[in-house]
Amino acid sequence: MKIRLVLGASAAALAMGVGTVGAAPAPHGTRPVPSAGASPSAFGPGKLDPAGLKSALDGVHRAGIPGVYAEVRDAGRTWRGASGVADLGTGRPVRPDMRQRVGSITKTFTAAAVMQQVEQGRIRLDAPIGGYLPHLVPGERGNKITVRMLLNHTSGIPDYIPYAFPSLQTPSPESLDDNRFRRFRPAELIELGLNAPPAAEPGGLPGVYSNTNYQLLGQLLEQVTGTPAEEYITRNVIDRAGLRHTEFPAGPRIKGPHARMYEALFGLIDPPRDYSVYDTSWVGPGAALVSTMEDLNRFYGELLDGGIVNRSSLAEMQRTIPVIALDGSTIEYGLGLHKVEMQGCGTFWGSDGTAWGAGTMSLTRADGRRQMSVAVNLQRWNKRDAASGKPQPHPIDDALSTWYRQAMCGEVSTPAD
């Protein structure tokens, strides 16, 4: 099966620079791999190949991403690398330990928090959401849509983003600037989604990806715990996993070292504009988290090892269905988790995410031995075809495919479909 992981195609939902390889301390339980002077043959196919990883990362930068950085783990060894610049204006280099807006990777954290409440008996997966939030989803719709349907995007509730950012339907980038410092209320966003024409019937397949679902799940968490969703997730998921650089930002700015985040919006913004300063209330518990590649690998490792939810909950999270993503592609989605089959090197679990100008991917092999997290600071680089309106292929897409194969399988060549 061919994977489609490009970090830049969804509707909302990476100057010259010298490539660097980080020498940051390794996380607990891992051994850093030398970034230079090590022979690739010392690791062999499927192992960590520092030279191959660095070359593939440099290829992403050369293809057009200003800055790209990553962490790859394999059986206790860790490699970190970066290539390009964090700031096109100053030439400041990107670093492997930088913080990133990780977009919809946040959904895995929120889903794990919901599953914790399922374990405690406060939430039932197949109970109607109207029983918990009758003021938000009243009537027949509230009776038909279950908690599970929100988690796996089969609720049929459409995404609110085209209505919160109305210029995207023109298309025009005007709404991006209009909303930079706007403070959205969850109920306001939920209402936009519920008032739009339904995307599908509740429970229908394939599911239709919608950020409205996770705004509702945030309100559900607050209802049953008496604590704002972001606070509950911080205490019971982020802190439990031992993450030191992951948080819901309190305002539009990111604390700590980070790159500028350049949005091209399929060629509508030329040159791409920096949106690293942005109020993320428009996504909240669905996509607002800031994290690092080290923290993401640690999080998915803990989750898949049963350290955040129990094995029964994890099995529910890994029950996948086909879901139509915001870019029109079909993904295998569970409860906050993507399933990705890499031909020749196994099944991976995790998620990708985008924010304006930022793209992130984090995947962990089912056996937990191989992990990859990568961040880029350019989004929606593909220009649209004038006739069809479809995003056109770009060298960045091929460079990222090469990187994924190297990072996840220890190979550069991609096997035939």
Image: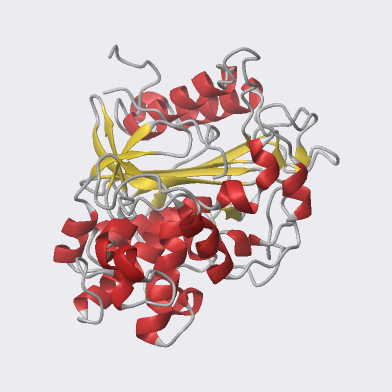
Judge from the rendering whether residue 51 lies leftward or rightward of residue 98; answer left or right: left
Picture mark count = 0
Judge from the rendering whether residue 27 lies leftward or rightward of residue 383; answer left or right: left
Q: Is residue 70 above or below residue 279?
A: above
> Residue 20: x percent and y percent?
64, 37
Work out whether residue 44 or residue 118 is closer to the camera in this orientation and state it. Answer: 118
Judge from the rendering whether residue 79 lies leftward or rightward of residue 332; answer left or right: right
Work out whether residue 265 or residue 234 is closer to the camera in this orientation and state it. Answer: 265
Q: Is residue 255 above or below residue 8?
A: below
Instruction: Say which residue appears at 21% left-offset and 70% top-offset.
Output: 127
* The C terminus: image quadrant: top left
Q: Would residue 156 be seen by someone viewing this image from the given angle? A: yes
Most extreme residue toward the right is: 89
Q: How is the image coloured?
A: secondary structure
> Residue 250: x percent and y percent?
65, 72
Instruction: Identify the image quadrant of residue 99.
Output: bottom right
> Residue 132: x percent and y percent?
32, 78
Instruction: Identify the image quadrant of residue 138.
Output: bottom left
Q: Would residue 293 be seen by someone viewing this image from the given angle? A: no
* The N terminus: image quadrant: top left
Instruction: Say which residue appears at 53% left-offset and 32% top-offset.
Output: 9
Q: Is residue 136 above or below residue 55?
A: below
Work out whether residue 76 or residue 397 is closer to the camera in this orientation and state it. Answer: 397
Judge from the rendering whether residue 188 lies leftward or rightward of residue 156; answer left or right: right
> Residue 382: x percent and y percent?
61, 24
